[in-house]
Amino acid sequence: MSDPTTREGILVYDSQCNLCVATKAWIEERDLALRITFVSAHEPSLLKSFPELQGMDLLAEITWIGEDMRIKRGADAIAAALLLLPGWSWAGKLLLPGMEFPR
């Protein structure tokens, strides 16, 4: 796993899920300032590096770990990433914290 301390946030995604991989690629393509570190939920050293993720189903939802070590899941995680992307922070602001999406 690359050193995440140089970035402003970490996006943990399921690298075996097509939607998750496509979401990661879309965000990564727009992260021109390299502010986000992307880590597969299948990364063996993930839980050693971030023990606060212990017990979370990391394959169920995309997960964000902020610089302040606050964890956000699902739409909140996507919103946190969008806030760091040039020209896309408006979209992150539209995804209100705690917003529930129908499943």
Image (tube, helix red, strand yellow):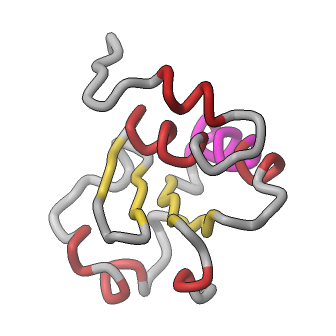
Toward which corner of the image does residue 96 lie, by quadrant? top left
Toward which corner of the image does residue 73 lie, by quadrant? top left
Q: Give the main secondary structure of the magenta stretch.
A: helix
Give the vertical position of 99 relative to 48 (above or below). Answer: above
Which residue appears farthest toward the top when viewing the image? 102
Toward which corner of the image does residue 32 lie, by quadrant? bottom right
Front-most of residues 59 and 84: 84
* Horizontal side of residue 37 vs 63, given as left or right: right
Which percent across, then down, holds residue 66? Answer: 41, 63
Q: Does the magenta-highlighted stretch encompass residue 25?
A: yes
What residue is shown at x 21% (from left), y 58% (from top)? 56
* Horizontal side of residue 46 vs 26, given as left or right: left
**Quadrant where the N terminus is found in the figure:** bottom right
Which residue appears farthest toward the left when viewing the image? 55
Number of marks = 0
Q: Which residues are magenta?
A: 17-26
Which percent across, then down, holds residue 91? Answer: 60, 26
Front-most of residues 90 and 10: 90
What residue is shown at x 42% (from left), y 86% (from top)? 45
Which percent across, then down, holds residue 95? Answer: 45, 24
Give the vertical position of 63 relative to 18 (above or below). Answer: below
Give the vertical position of 9 relative to 51 (above or below). Answer: above
* Horizontal side of residue 35 vs 25, given as left or right: left
* Horizontal side of residue 42 vs 50, given as left or right: right
Which percent across, then down, holds residue 64? Answer: 42, 55
Q: Does the magenta-highlighted stretch encompass residue 38?
A: no
What residue is shown at x 61% (from left), y 69% (from top)? 37
